[in-house]
Image: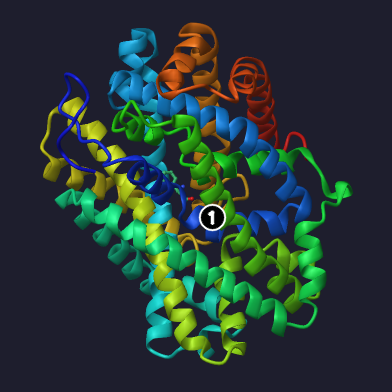
Amino acid sequence: MNETTPHAATKRGSFTGKIGFVLAAAGSAVGLGNIWRFPYLAAKYGGGIFLLVYILLSLTFGFSLMIAEIAIGRKTGKSPVSAFKSLDHRFAFLGYLAAAIPAIILPYYSVIGGWVTKYAFGFLLGEGGEMAKETYFGGFISQPFEPVLWFLLFVALTALVVLFGVQKGVEKVSKFMMPVLIMLMIFIVIYMLATTDGAGAGVAYYLKPDFSKFSVMTVVAAMGQLFYSMSLAMGIMITYGSYMKKEISIERSVHQIEIFDTGVAILAGLLIVPACYAFSGGDPAALGKGPSLMFGVLPQVFERMPGGGVIGFVFFVTVLLAALTSSISLMETVVSTLMDKFKWDRKLCCLAVLGVCLLLGLPSSLGYSAWSSFKVLGMQILDLFDFISNSIMMPLLALITCVFVGFVIKPSTVVEEIECSGKFGWRRLFTVTIRYVAPVFLLAILISSVLDAFGIVKI
Ligand code: PHE
């Protein structure tokens, strides 16, 4: 981003060009969601069938919502609260709701970021063999202090970048890091497939849809993951859209961001799911491990590779960088909303966000040790925050956004904005999705995830 060439009246930064926009948006989108969250959901919710549902949803819902958010941002040239307000003052609350979501995600995101930092350091210190042990990860997160320290380190790194507002740095890091991450992942996947007995069956589990494994929860989980992974339904794309120049095609950019984001997720799944399948002999308990899956499986893969210690280190460092570009975008959103609203300076807002982050992040970390017996609706604290943001707040916000675009400002407002830079190829798909398909679906999802969580209906 550079600080000049803003939109007409506002003094906003703008991305240097199309590549800058796509990379910055992809930098926010590609993160732990793709590498840590996607594989464990795919493993848990039936492998191939989850993948299929996810891809279908991303081409329809993901595409339409991202288009709508970026267009709203670019049209108004404002951050979420003011953007909704300027389009219709009754909907200003949507902006606040949107800003609350990253505030909930950031703390637990940073806890996981801390685990990644620990693993990167572990490999650096040559502890790869130690970390490959079955019980290592469980032992690590159940210590009361160490995970908290790594969490603090991760938050501090994020806050430092946000404090100095080094957007240029973020753009540069993303440009370099994305290709490294992708190449490294392809290499590790090929290596793992070639050297692990039984990986073939794991690949089949991951890629072949088995319709008997389909359930409503497959769709609920895939939808939640989609929002999370594409950084949707929390105002981030509105903010980024406001930095985008008029002559750049929103439609083409969205396709590219999706390819990036979904591509990295699929690759990460291909890396983790078959390996887990092979090591556990397809045991559903191992596949359903959840948040600990990546940390349990990958060190085992690295342990079998010659030079695995070095590869493990490089891998976790790139994951760490991917996580940082995302956590920075999370924190930046909250900070800029506070700055707009209260007119505080950046430092004070950073401090406030840091405080909230510590307050909410500590319990997420301690939820695996000192407070492990504390559960709400059968969920650990970290899972609970994840559930509230991804399964409740984001679908709710997405639902209201769809109604807002579909019936209040009308899809034509978005279409006009997209057509500033040429024809809108997927216009019909967009209009139908945003008006009819998405709201119905989102409502159904919202209801079913609530019923499921309260144990009223087991889906
Ligand atoms: N999309 C990021 C990921 O996949 C997470 C994130 C969510 C980042 C929301 C910013 C905003 O990890």
Q: Residue at x 48, y 71 (%)?
A: 141
* Label 1: which secondary element: helix
How packed mark 1 is, by other alpha carbons closer than 10 Å (few <14, some 14-19, many 20 or more), is many
72 left or right of 429?
A: left
| Some atom of ligand 1 lies within 8 Å of the CB belonging to the residue at label 1 | yes
Q: Is residue 81 above or below residue 5?
A: above
Q: Is residue 420 above or below residue 160?
A: above
Give amino acid for label 1. Asn
Specify the quadrant of the image occupied by residue 305: bottom right
Observer able to see residue 115: no
Residue 364 pos. (x, y %): 44, 56
Residue 422 pos. (x, y %): 46, 23
Observer able to see residue 283: yes
Specify the quadrant of the image occupied by residue 421: top left
Q: Residue at x 71, y 50 (%)?
A: 51
The foreground one among 195 and 447 is 195
283 left or right of 225?
A: right
Residue at the limit of the structure toward the front, as seen here = 422
The foreground one among 303 and 151 is 303
Q: Quadrant of the C terminus?
A: top right
Q: Residue at x 48, y 57 (%)?
A: 32
| Residue corresponding to mark 1 | 34
Q: Residue at x 77, y 69 (%)?
A: 202
Specify the quadrant of the image occupied by residue 37: bottom right
Q: Is residue 167 above or below residue 443?
A: below
Residue 452 pos. (x, y %): 70, 38
Residue 217 pos. (x, y %): 73, 41
163 left or right of 90?
A: left
Residue at the limit of the structure toward the right, as seen here = 212
